[in-house]
Amino acid sequence: MAALVGSPPMPWQRYVLDVALEIDPATGRLAYRKVGLSVPRQQGKTETVLTVMVHRIMAWDRQNVSYTAQTRIDARKRWEDEFLAKLDASQLKGKYHPRKTTGNEAIIWKSTRSRLGIVSTTEKAGHGPPLDLGVIDESFAHKDDRVEQAMSPAMLTRPNAQMWWASAGGTDASVFLNEKRKSGRELIERAWLTGEWPAVAYFEWFAPDELPRGDPATWFTCMPALGYTVTPDIIRTELESMDASEFDRAYLNRTKEARPPADPNVPRDEWARCVRPDSRPDTSRLALAVDVAPLRDWTSIAAVSPLPDGTVHVELVDRRPGTDWAAPALARLRELRQPIAIGIDSKGPVASLLGELAGYGITPPEDPEKPRVGDLAVLRTPDVAVACGQFADAVRRGTTVHIDQPALTGAMNGARTRPLGDAWAWSRSRSESVDISPLVAATNALWALREREDAAQSDYDVLDSVL
């Protein structure tokens, strides 16, 4: 059918169609009453849903198919400019009758008397005659489930009814899409655990946040048409010309999150200019720091390292759920890397790890005037303000470099600050939309480096003279 319409299926489309249109041998009916499809833009989503709709009106008698997009106007434009135009240019021309009367648009298949029409995105969408196939395209534009709730009752008496929703990634406002993606993932995960598959087929291609947006290997994980109808050179051009968050939404199928109001203390723009993808730390000259999110659901370890050109490399070493992994991980890093110091905020949520760290021999120096390599550098309240100002200044001056790790950059972009005396500090409570523990860890690691660099240098010099 796809070939007849003029778009022979790519492997990913064949896979989706093969699974979504499976027949339950026990009933002889479609196995899935609902189908979700989420892929990046320009991957062939429209051709896929068109194939499903044409197949339905061509193969079955007196079927009622309804299509909707962002709005009824958008649906009409796609119906006429893409669907009808594609059919008119295919081998199927002449087998259907187009009716273009506004408000009564339909493609009517002559031999089956089945029709493909369009509906609005209101609560009345799909009301009327029984519905055999409903397609909610561009689902990112829907702020609630009113279209689905309108279509579903019209399908109850139709034994082979099926509803599709399809979309690329949306924004925080894409309530319908975000809920569908969340529930779809949960259904698949539960099915793999239990072996019991639901009456919903869900397909999604997207790049997790930890994968770098500029790496072609990332593109191949989430763009199933790459190498078929889209080339890496085209995607590279899009990357260079688009806003990063919009590129993520369109081509990596990530949800575009609202950017919080600008905080004048947060050097977001300067941080973006400090990206150096090929930067690597000097592993013989590291300072580390650890931080914990307020809900204790995430822990981050960061490292900083001075480089020969006078800049400081900043990197998120690890970020994982919970806190139980942090102390043994730091102990192992201390053994392997002999860091100049390990920064920790004595008043933050991470302070609860002090006892666990002591169990691994990671403690503050016995003699503050003679710190040892790998000792804790503990920030007191005044030190926190100094550390935050120090880190922000370094970013604004361009004396820090980083490799644009999503969790660290996301923390910078979502961070807010709070007054601390006559200065300021990172605010965990005001940075509600993002976990800023990666940024706090990086800030404290830089402070630890500055506090202990001279003392550690003396230690290294003595050691070198002995050797």
Image (tube, rainbow, N blue to C red):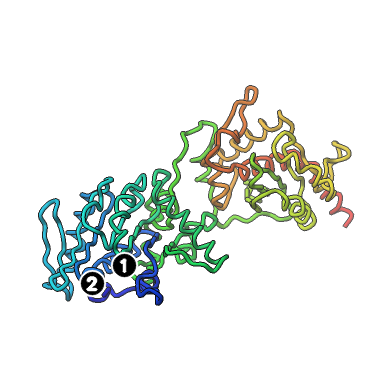
| Separation of marks 2 and 1 at Cα, in angstroms | 10 Å
Position of 389 with respect to 377 (left or right) is left
Residue 467, label in figure: none
Of residue 106 and residue 254, the one placed in the foreground of this image is: 106
Report the residue at 33% width, 63% height from top: 162
Q: Quadrant of residue 88?
A: bottom left
Q: Earlier in the sequence, mark 2 or mark 1?
A: 2
Q: Is residue 361 visible?
A: yes
Report the residue at 40% width, 46% height from top: 175
| Residue 90 x/y as whole percent | 18, 73
Position of 51 with respect to 104 (left or right) is right
Report the residue at 59% width, 42% height from top: 436
| Residue 288 x/y as whole percent | 71, 47
Residue highlighted by disc 1: 160
Residue most extreme to the top: 422
Q: Quadrant of the N terminus?
A: bottom left
Of residue 355 and residue 54, the one placed in the foreground of this image is: 54
Position of 319 with respect to 15 (left or right) is right
Please report contact status of discs 2 and 1: CB closer than 8 Å, yes or no: yes
Residue highlighted by disc 2: 60
Q: How many C-alpha atoms fall within 10 Å of the one at disc 1: few (<14), some, or many (≥20)?
A: some
Q: Quadrant of the C terminus?
A: bottom right
Q: How many C-alpha atoms fall within 10 Å of the one at disc 2: few (<14), some, or many (≥20)?
A: some
Residue flagged by tag 2: what amino acid is it?
Trp
Position of 156 with respect to 185 (left or right) is left
Q: Does dot 1 land on a helix, a strand or a loop?
A: loop
| Residue 196 x/y as whole percent | 52, 67
